[in-house]
Image: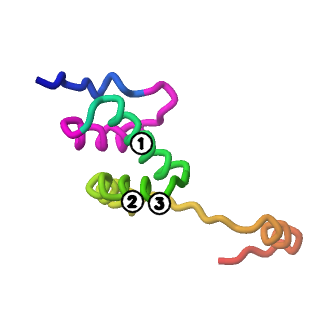
Amino acid sequence: MKPSIDVDSLRTEHESEEQWEVRRSFLLEHKDDFPEAELVTLAQIYTNIEFLGCRYPPQTMKRISVLAEKVSAKYKESRKNKLKRTFVQASDAAEQKAKRTFKK
C-alpha cells in the first residue's frame, strides 16, 4: 500500500498564501497519481510557470498543461476580479512623465 502524502507539510516558508493555495490544489489533485518526489517537482514546475513565467521544454510544458487543467481554470476564475497590472515601456513612461500626460 502506498503511503499517504501529507500535503500540508510541503509548504515552503517563502510561498505567499496565493501561491501555496494554487500549489496545494495541484498537490491534492494528483497526490494519488505520483510518488511524492515526482509530485512535488511537478507542482513546483507548475507554480514556476504560473507565477514566475518560467518556460520548460515543450514536452514538459504540455505535460504540466494537461495536469494543471482543473487547477488553472479554478485559479484563473478567481483572478477575474483582481487588480490587473499594466506594463509599459520605460521610454513611454518617461516621455509621459516629461510631458505630464498620461494615456488612458
Q: Amino acid at mark 3?
A: Pro
| Residue 62 numbered tag | 2
Give the structural element (helix, strand or loop) at label 1: helix
Q: Nearer the viewer, residue 61 or 102?
A: 61
Q: Which residue is drawn at the image coordinates 65% and 65% (left, top)? A: 87
In terms of image quadrants, where is residue 94? bottom right
Membership of 30 in magenta stretch: yes
Nearest to the eye among marks 3 and 1: give it.
3
The answer to whether residue 103 is above or below residue 67 is: below
Q: On the image, numbered disc 3 is attached to which residue?
A: 58
| Residue 36 numbered tag | none
Q: Amino acid at mark 1?
A: Glu
Give the structural element (helix, strand or loop) at label 3: helix
Q: Residue furthest right?
A: 98
What are the residue bounds of the magenta stretch? Answer: 12-33
Membership of 77 in magenta stretch: no
Which x, y percent locates residue 22?
Answer: 36, 44
